[in-house]
Amino acid sequence: MYKIPCLLLLLTAVPAQAISEYDLTIGVLGAQGNNVYFETIEDRSVTCLHQKLYIDITSDFGKSAHSNLLFAKSTSRKLSRVDYDQTSEGQCVVALIEVED
């Protein structure tokens, strides 16, 4: 009798796995409200809402990630790695960003 609720609690407590993409070129880079967004020239393994990856720039991570995006775009460098999660609405939210040497 108590095994089913415990199992459901355990299943809902498991965090979603981040999606990792490698060697991406920034195409479009923009801002809207408290978010910056970008598209990549290369196809990604997941179809995101509006084909964009979003970053909330109100956090320290968001400000740092935005700086990395501007650097990569202005120097024509690739993003060597991007990790992101997809919401139930299909929006892709960046959790890690890395610019190539």
Image (cartoon, rainbow, N blue to C red):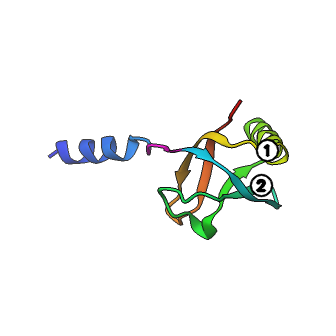
Residue 39 image offset from top left, x and y in percent: 68, 59
Q: Is residue 40 left or right of residue 35?
A: left
- Identify the residue at horizontal 55%, vertical 60% (top origin): 43
Q: Amino acid under label 1? A: His
Q: Which residues are magenta?
A: 16-21
Residue 27 image offset from top left, x and y in percent: 72, 59
SS category of the residue bearing label 1: helix
**Residue assigned mark 2:** 36
Which one is in front, 21 or 19?
A: 21
**Residue assigned mark 1:** 66
- Identify the residue at horizontal 53%, vertical 58% (top origin): 87
Residue 50, picture quadrant: bottom right
Circle 2 Cα neighbour tier, 10 Å, few/some/many (<14 / 14–19 / ≥20): many
Q: Is residue 35 left or right of residue 40?
A: right
Residue at the bottom extreme of this rendering = 50
Picture layout, residue 84 above or below residue 86: above
Residue at the top extreme of this rendering = 101
SS category of the residue bearing label 2: strand
Circle 1 Cα neighbour tier, 10 Å, few/some/many (<14 / 14–19 / ≥20): many
Residue 2 visible at all? no
Which one is in front, 71 or 95?
A: 71
Mark seen at residue 6: none
- Decide: marks 1, 2 in contact (CB < 8 A)? yes
Q: Amino acid under label 2? A: Val
For marks 1 and 2, the one nearer the N-term is 2
Residue 49 image offset from top left, x and y in percent: 58, 67
State how far apart marks 1 and 2 are (Cα).
7 Å
Picture layout, residue 46 above or below residue 70: below
